[in-house]
Amino acid sequence: MPVAFVTAYYALVDLAGVRAGESVLVHSAAGGVGMAAVQLARYLGAEVFATASESKWSVVRGLGVSGERIASSRSVEFERVFGSGVDVVLDSLAGELVDASLRLVRPGGRFVEMGKSDVRDAGEVAEAFGGVWYRAFDLAEAGVERMGEVLREVVGLFEAGVLELLPVGVGDVRRAGEVFGVMRRARHVGKLVLSVPSVVDGGGGWVVVSGASGVLGGVVARHVVVERGVRRLLLLSRRGGDAPGVGGLVAELVAAGAEVRVVACDVADRDALAGVLSSLEGGVSGVVHAAGVLDDVMVESLSAERLAGVLAAKVTGAWNLHELTLNRGVRWFVMFSSAAGVLGAAGQANYAAGNAFLDALAAFRRSRGLPGVSVAWGLWEQRSVMTEGLGDIDLTRFARMGVVPMRNDDGLRLFDAAAESARSLVVAAELDGRALGAADRDTPVQPMLRGLAERQVAPRRRWTASAGDGTQPDGAPLARQLVGLGKGERRRVLLHTVREHAATVLGHGSAESIPAEQGFLDMGFDSLTAVELRNRLSTATGLRLPATLVFNHPDATRLADHLGAELMPPDTVDDADTALRAELDRLETSLRDSAADTDGATRAMVVTRLQDLLSHWSTAPNGSAAPNGSTAPNGSAAPNGSTPPNGSTARNGSAASDDAGADVAENLESAGADELFSFIDREFGSH
């Protein structure tokens, strides 16, 4: 940090000799030396002009530079903006930007080059730019004695409140390449520094564990004592020593050689937590924030009270621990987050939000050079207070999602890896790639997990307007299946679809296990399983369905009728032309999707069938030429007057002679597969 101010001081005072009333242009004014130079130039009484990338102009304004004196450092436009000229330029640019800067310097002015990516000859500069004094420099040339004098002057200005410290971005030394990439692209403000990680151990101080009376809190407490050598442990929970199992846990820890204190303290109570921490002699070496509560509810029913209850333990507790352990020598700070905040979880909007805050807090701490990691846990095999209510339906749902319950030893290995990670957020979960890959098409793979699925996962579908009030993706499978069916058959297909998906959600083996008119709630559906059924039906139908779908249409029969009305409104269900067009679209899509991977024999078979189909449709039922008067195979008119394969052309837009028709038919007979597919594209359009 002092180097930036010493460099700027030497450039402005020793080299440029800036005096009160002069004008100074500072390039890259949002960088470390640039921000220091702006402060020093204003202290010297100079009129400051500055350049920076546009996204950083607010930073420069915060240094006291008025908006009309700020321009972009990315183009020569600053020459026009500062057209009246300046007395001194402190430069760190290159190429045409240097030329533009030199043209801004008034005759006899000074140009100090500190970036040195484009060094010029001082004599040539003076001759070309009206006697401008030019100097490129290294701070080392000042000598040790002079640098010491400058440093003392700078420290005095800090003590007098004239100068303010620069913002600092901190990156883990293990990710130095990324940090230097940020610096190279000038994406930072102020200074960038590299931090060296601490070893996760006792460190001589206390390790604070919140939520210690919970199952995971106890598991981790044992682990850090036995495996990490922690010798002073503070266990916090709302019930303290009265919580079940705490006495046995303490006995184990003491037997392992640890000094243990158990305190009943809600970490969301800042005053109570401050009192507990202030009683600890020897400082705090580590923090494990494992406190948390669940209160699952759909967003539509989420009240302020139910949101606050979940956020108190996660958000308020974490922030209190963050603030109250500052300057206490904390070497590691681990927060127990959840994959719900990363991947999302139905019915857990409040819980996901609280965990997302922990993820952000870890990044916030890292950016300030403080230790911090948020561990987004998956499902642990050992049941806790938060997971003891999971039933077979829930576990089946997790299995379909590819989530495997973790054994304690696996979870603790992941804990160790996370605590020493160079990243601020890690997802610690056991996933089954085969289960992800085996999921049926109506169980979409989480976008963030697609790379782990052992199958090709289709990209998200494009949404287009559909019948009814909703929208559906191109080629929604159920909608295609319904095309051309009679009313009774459509209703049967829809009812079977609803029952089949409901059976899957509840973990049953077949659609027959779901009575058509029994209420979903009577079968065991709750808010979470209702959302899963909605999601599966949304994928199958392509409709955007509300989260309250199952409650609005409370049995399979009524739900199937609702889907039917949305997919095939009354004014379209008997429209033969619409059905035929939809079937042609389906056929075209199928042919297009499979063309690249089809072998020669199959392509030949498809070509023959298409030729027969074209021949059949080229003549109207009464034997006359096909409409639109364009030439088609077998002597009839080609659709829309277009050109058939092999370049034969319809004549005059009317029915062609027998010879012309024969030519067209012959051309179709001899056309290759690629020519026929091209012909189909022209005749039926490309969708």
Image (tube, rainbow, N blue to C red):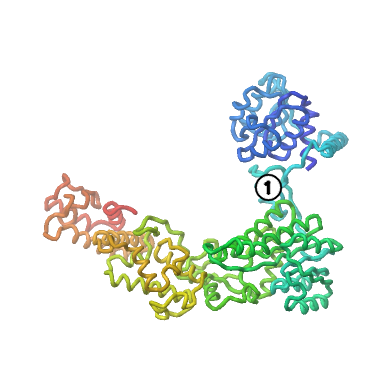
Going by the image, does 200 lie left or right of 349? right
Q: Decide: is 87 above or below 537.
A: above
Using the image as rendered, state which of residue 303 and residue 555 is in the foreground. Answer: 303
Using the image as rendered, state which of residue 419 and residue 538 is in the foreground. Answer: 538
Residue 409 appears in which quarter of the rendering? bottom right
Identity of the residue drawn at 62% across and 38% down: 53
Q: In terms of secondary structure, where does tag 1 sit?
A: helix
Identity of the residue drawn at 66% across and 21% down: 128
Using the image as rendered, state which of residue 76 and residue 598 is in the foreground. Answer: 76
Going by the image, does 477 lie left or right of 444? left
Residue for badge 1: 180
Using the image as rendered, state which of residue 72 and residue 662 is in the foreground. Answer: 72
Q: Position of residue 378 (x, y in %)?
A: 61, 69
**What amino acid type should be assigned to the residue bearing mark 1?**
Phe
Identity of the residue drawn at 69% across and 67% down: 291
Residue 343: tell me if it is visible.
no
Q: Position of residue 294 (x, y in %)?
A: 62, 68
Residue 353 appears in which quarter of the rendering? bottom right
In which quadrant is the N terminus drawn?
Answer: top right
Residue 515: tell me if it is visible.
yes
Q: Position of residue 321 (x, y in %)?
A: 74, 60
- Toward the right, the furthest residue is 145
Badge 1 density bin: few <14, some 14–19, many ≥20, Cα 10 Å: some
In which quadrant is the C terminus drawn?
Answer: bottom left
- Count of all numbered marks drawn on residues in the image: 1
Going by the image, does 664 lie left or right of 373? left
Identity of the residue drawn at 69% across and 19% down: 107
Q: Decide: is 224 above or below 26.
A: below
Q: Position of residue 366 (x, y in %)?
A: 71, 54
